[in-house]
Amino acid sequence: MPASGAGGALVLLDGVTPPPDGVTGCVHTVAWFTARLGGALLELAVSQRELTLEQCLSEAIARTAQAHGEGCDLSHRRTPQATVVVARWDEQRVEHLVLSDSVLLIEGVDGSVAAVLDDRIAQLAAVERVTDARRNAEGGFFTAAADPAAAARAVTGSTARTDVRALAALTDGAARWVEVFRAGGWAQCLAVLAKEGPQALVDRVRSAELADPERRAFRRGKTHDDAAVLYAEL
């Protein structure tokens, strides 16, 4: 999350868990993929400010795909992939991009909190069982995998810099505090981050998960999920 003078950027990726059989058509791990995609995306967002964040993500996906090599089947539906949150700011504006089920919170100088969500998975889950057939497909949901065109599916926008006080990026595992356990709303979530820091939010999520190990009170796909948070005051 580099910052220089009045400008800066943050990038948060959440690698998608491989299938139980481990078959992804790729010799690389999700960790390998996220490290390269995240590094390329952050470098582009900071150094190529003439590019939109959508263009930065598209180029980062293309660079990472080229790094795979001939031994990887990048057409495989479960090729290593990740959700994406990226924000970039300068003296004039704060830009954002969200792809898949991670979350970006934008706190205004007036204390209001807006959640930027790509809710296609949630919309699908409300009416049907979400399967791999819906992954990176029309009428389904999209992640950053091997196709640069997925960047065009992201939720993007910008806000005047003078209207923004802070930003918070959360993986879906951290966002469980709001979305699964209903312990508070997005404004309360950001208040925890501002007062106690990201680890405090993760600790609260872990406590809620441990209190419901069999997932009876709060339905979810996994008892525990990776949880990561970035918080930045501008």
Image (cartoon, helix red, strand yellow):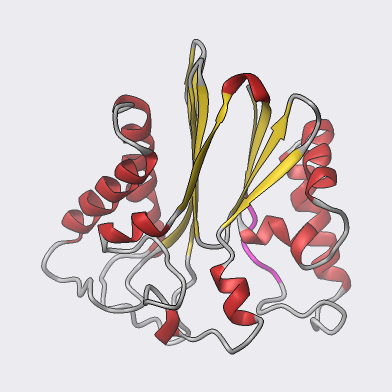
Q: Position of residue 3 (x, y in %)?
A: 49, 20
| For residue 68, above or below residue 220 | above
Asked where in the image residue 55 lies, by quadrant, the reply is top left
Asked where in the image residue 110 lies, by quadrant, the reply is top right
Q: Residue furthest left?
A: 70
Residue depicted at x 57% and y 25%: 160
Asked where in the image residue 173 lies, by quadrant, the reply is bottom right
| For residue 169, above or below residue 46 | below
Residue depicted at x 83% and y 38%: 191
- The answer to whether any part of residue 229 appears in the image is no
Predominant secondary structure in magenta? loop
Q: Position of residue 206 (x, y in %)?
A: 78, 60
Looking at this view, is 171 or 184 the one in front? 184
**55 on left or right of 101:** left
Q: Position of residue 86 (x, y in %)?
A: 48, 42
Q: Position of residue 163 (x, y in %)?
A: 66, 24
| For residue 142, above or below residue 75 | above
Looking at this view, is 215 or 60 the one in front? 60
Which quadrant is home to the C terminus? Answer: top right
**158 on left or right of 190:** left
Residue depicted at x 22% and y 53%: 62
Looking at this view, is 206 or 191 the one in front? 191
Residue depicted at x 44% and y 78%: 139
Residue 111 belongs to the span the image colors magenta: no
**26 on left or right of 225:** left
Query: Which region of the structure is painted magenta?
Result: 224-228
**215 on left or right of 70:** right
- The answer to whether any part of residue 233 appears in the image is yes
Q: Residue furthest top?
A: 5
